[in-house]
């Protein structure tokens, strides 16, 4: 199984809502990633978890809160988002989280903030 | 700071044509280079990964080459098909977990 799954596929939320994005992998990978991708732009790294510990936070606003409950699961909690946060949110995983390492991407969650 | 550039930004070709997509990077101290495909509104599909010690990788009609010293990679697609239409992203991995992406080449293969 070389699949990374993400739910939901689409999410529409208001600026006062609280919602969560979920990512799951069963490849035994120990590193998981959140990326944000705006239209016609490349993905931008947000967070990296390695062995369930946050190892990289790319100066992401606190309205995005990641959580890694176990090595297979990664959540992104959303609160008080802005319309400019509308984007495709991609999750990825890799074996160790140390270069060189192949990252496998999920299909993404399309987020719209009204 | 690593920068990745992809040329051209968009490419339109007739079906059956062979084509080359280009990727260049500024810092040659990389561990690997990866080519991805992205369909509109979808996630990334890994096509080929070339380790820094390798010169090329092949998968079906796809061939990727790497010249680390000159900071260049090419993705060659043979006998293109309409189903190859997508955006192709190049990404390099240096000394950390981070992937640095180019802006992509949007390929359209016309029937």
Image: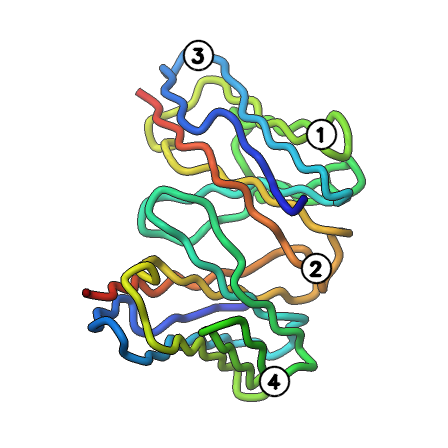
Residue identified by numbered label 4: B55
Quadrant showing the N terminus of chain B = bottom right
- Mark 3: secondary structure: loop
Asked if both marks, 2 and 1, belong to the same chain, the answer given is yes
Asked if both marks, 3 and 4, belong to the same chain, the answer given is no
Asked whether residue B107 appears in the rendered view, the answer is: yes
Residue drawn 35% across and 42% down? B41
Residue drawn 25% across and 66% down? B109
Query: Is label 2 or label 3 in front?
Result: 2
Marks 1 and 4, how far apart in space? 37 Å
Marks 4 and 2, how far apart in space? 18 Å
Residue identified by numbered label 1: A68
Tags 3 and 1 touching, CB below 8 Å: no
Picture quadrant of residue A31: top right
Label 1 chain ID: A
Residue identified by numbered label 3: A17
Determine whether, in the image, residue B17 is placed left or right of residue B47: left
User: Residue A101: which numbered mark, if any?
Assistant: 2
Residue drawn 40% across and 32% down? A110
Determine whether, in the image, residue B55 is placed left or right of residue B80: right
- Which residue is nearer to you in this view: B18 or B107? B18
Q: Is residue A56 above or below residue B47?
A: above
């Amino acid at each position: 199984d070389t699949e990374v799954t993400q739910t939901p596929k689409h999410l529409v939320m208001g600026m006062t809502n609280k919602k969560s994005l979920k990512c799951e992998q069963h490849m035994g990978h120990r590193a998981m990633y959140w990326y944000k991708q705006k239209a016609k732009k490349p993905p931008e790294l947000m967070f990296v978890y390695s062995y369930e510990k946050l190892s990289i936070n790319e100066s992401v606003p606190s309205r995005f809160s990641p959580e890694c409950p176990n090595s297979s699961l990664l959540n992104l909690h959303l609160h008080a988002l802005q319309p400019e946060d509308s984007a495709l949110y991609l999750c990825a995983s890799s074996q160790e989280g140390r270069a060189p390492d192949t990252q496998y991407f999920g299909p993404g969650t399309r987020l719209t903030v009204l | 700071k690593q920068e990745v550039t992809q040329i051209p930004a968009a490419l339109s070709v007739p079906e059956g044509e062979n084509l080359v997509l280009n990727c260049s990077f500024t810092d040659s101290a990389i561990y690997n280079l990866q080519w991805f495909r992205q369909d509109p509104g979808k996630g990334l599909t890994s096509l080929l990964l070339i380790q820094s010690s390798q010169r090329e990788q092949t998968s079906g009609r796809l061939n990727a080459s790497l010249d680390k010293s000159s900071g260049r990679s090419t993705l060659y697609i043979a006998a293109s098909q309409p189903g190859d239409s997508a955006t192709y992203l190049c990404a390099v991995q240096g000394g950390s977990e981070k992937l640095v992406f180019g802006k992509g080449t949007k390929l359209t293969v016309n029937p």
